[in-house]
């Protein structure tokens, strides 16, 4: 996500932080949707243990992204303000 820049091509601005934050939220939403699909679908040829492991990996990644987003956003607020 380091390639995200604001309208002026600047990667280090409040706008760029907001864009990265939104991109992360969108990715978390995609992972959450994928998790729902995996947990609700018939597991063609997959053992339940494999499905459980995949769901655990998805949950871990969502948790990591939320933690990273929170710490990154806190840093952006310190540097650029809240924008509001």
Image (cartoon, rainbow, N blue to C red):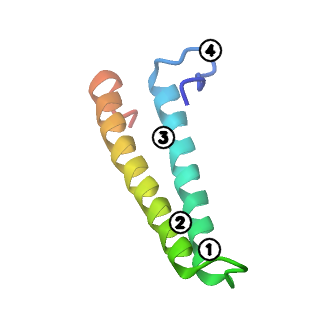
The x and y percentages for residue 35 are 56, 69
Of callouts 4 and 1, the N-terminal one: 4
Residue in the image at 57% along x and 59% along y: 31
Q: Badge 2 is on which residue?
A: 54
Q: Disc 4 versus disc 2: distance between alpha carbons?
A: 37 Å
Q: Which of marks 4 and 2 is in front?
A: 2
Q: Position of residue 28 (x, y in %)?
A: 52, 55
Residue 80 image offset from top left, x and y in percent: 35, 23
- Residue 47: horizontal and vertical position, in percent? 59, 79
- Marks 3 and 2: which is nearer the front? 2
- The answer to which of marks 1 and 2 sits earlier in the sequence is 1
Label 3 close to label 4 by CB (< 8 Å): no
Task: Single out the mark in the foreground, 3 or 1.
Answer: 1
Tell me the SS state at disc 2: helix
Mark 4 / mark 2, whichever is N-terminal: 4
Neighbour tally class for label 1: few under 14, some 14-19, many 20 plus, Cα within 10 Å: some
Q: Which residue is drawn at 55% across and 81% down?
A: 48
Q: In this view, does 39 lie to the left or right of 69?
A: right
Rendered view: 76 above or below 8:
below
Crowding at dot 4, Cα within 10 Å, few <14 / some 14-19 / many 20+, comes out as few
Residue behind mark 1: 38
Mark 1 touching mark 2, by CB under 8 A? Answer: yes
Among numbered discs 3 and 4, the one appearing first in the sequence: 4
Q: Which mark is residue 70?
A: none
Task: Look at discs 1 and 2 and give the one toward the viewer.
Answer: 2
Image quadrant where one finds the N terminus: top right
- Find the distance from the CA under tag 1 to the CA under tag 2: 8 Å
To which residue does mark 3 refer? 21
Q: Tell me if 84 is positioned left or right of 5 in this view.
A: left
How many C-alpha atoms fall within 10 Å of the one at disc 3: few (<14), some, or many (≥20)?
some
Which label belongs to residue 9? 4
């Amino acid at each position: 996500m380091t390639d995200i820049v604001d309208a002026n091509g600047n990667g280090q601005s409040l706008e760029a932080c907001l864009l990265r934050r939104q991109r992360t939220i969108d990715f978390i939403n995609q992972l959450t949707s994928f998790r729902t699909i995996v947990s609700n679908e018939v597991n063609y040829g997959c053992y339940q243990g494999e499905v459980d492991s995949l769901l655990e990996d998805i949950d871990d990644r969502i948790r990591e992204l939320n933690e990273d987003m929170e710490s990154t956003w806190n840093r952006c607020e310190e540097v650029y303000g809240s924008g509001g």
